[in-house]
Structures are given as C-alpha cells and as structure tokens.
Amino acid sequence: GEGKGVLNQEAEGLREVAGKLDENFAKAVKLLSECQGKAIVTGIGKSGIVGRKIASTLASTGKPAFFLHASEARHGDLGMVSDQDVVLLISNTGETEEMLEILPSLRLLGVGSILENARRKSLR
C-alpha cells in the first residue's frame, strides 16, 4: 500500500545520496571525528534551520556542538570559537554574504572548516 510506496521512495532517496558521497565527505567525517574541541554549525535562513538540527544531532551523540548564526558570528560571536573546533558552514548557494565574511576570520583562528552547499562548489 501507501506505506510501502513511501518507504521505497525514501530508500531511493538514500541511494541517490549515497551515490553522491565522495572523498570530501570522508574528509569531513574524519575532521569531525578527530576534532578535540566543539563542532560549531553555522548558516542563514533555511540552511540555518538545517544547521540547528545537525548541531542538535551531534550534541545528542556526545559531541560538544552548538549552532552559531552567521550574522551573529560577524558581530563578535566568533569569540566562542577556538583552534580546537571545527566549523560546518552550510549555504545553499555557497555565496551567502555572511558566510563569506566570516571565512577569513576562521582561517586566521586556525579553525577546521567544512563547507557544504547545494551547488557542490566551495565558498570562495
């Protein structure tokens, strides 16, 4: 019935995602698993909503994690970030102004960064 159709549709979605995982995914997982500090997830808008869920899920597995709104990061909240942390930046386009503005500061801090966007291009 209908339930079986939904499960088949979800299974197909998982197969599609699995087919898109590459060496960058493996690097991101390794960076997160070896992180000695916190996992910090940032984003704006819908990407921010997804980011909050990711941070919550990481925290529920025992990994210290929190969500940092990219706009707040630009106005002083990067003080919560250390060189022991990893920051996961989520942006649909990869061109989000707030995200692009915090990248240089993250690099200066020596923070590990994982960039994820729908276009599969790195943020600048």
Image: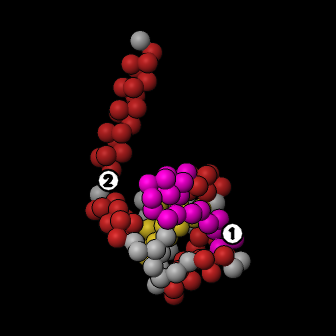
> Of the residues shown, which amino acid type is indicated by label 1?
Ser
Q: Residue at x 31, y 39 (%)?
A: 15
Provide the residue span drawn in magenta. Answer: 53-73
Q: Is residue 7 above or below residue 27?
A: above
> Which quarter of the figure is the N terminus placed in?
top left
Residue at 43 percent of width and 18 percent of height: 3
Q: Which residue is mark 1?
A: 71
Residue 33 belongs to magenta span: no
Q: Is residue 54 visible?
A: no
> Residue 87: which disc?
none
Where does residue 79 sit, x and y in percent of width and height? 62, 81
The residue that disc 2 covers is: 21
Judge whether 32 appears above or below 47 on screen. below
Which residue is located at x 69 percent, y 79 percent? 76
In what element is the residue under mark 1? helix
Classify mark 2: residues with Cα within 10 Å, few (<14), some (14-19) or many (20+): few
Mark 2: secondary structure: loop
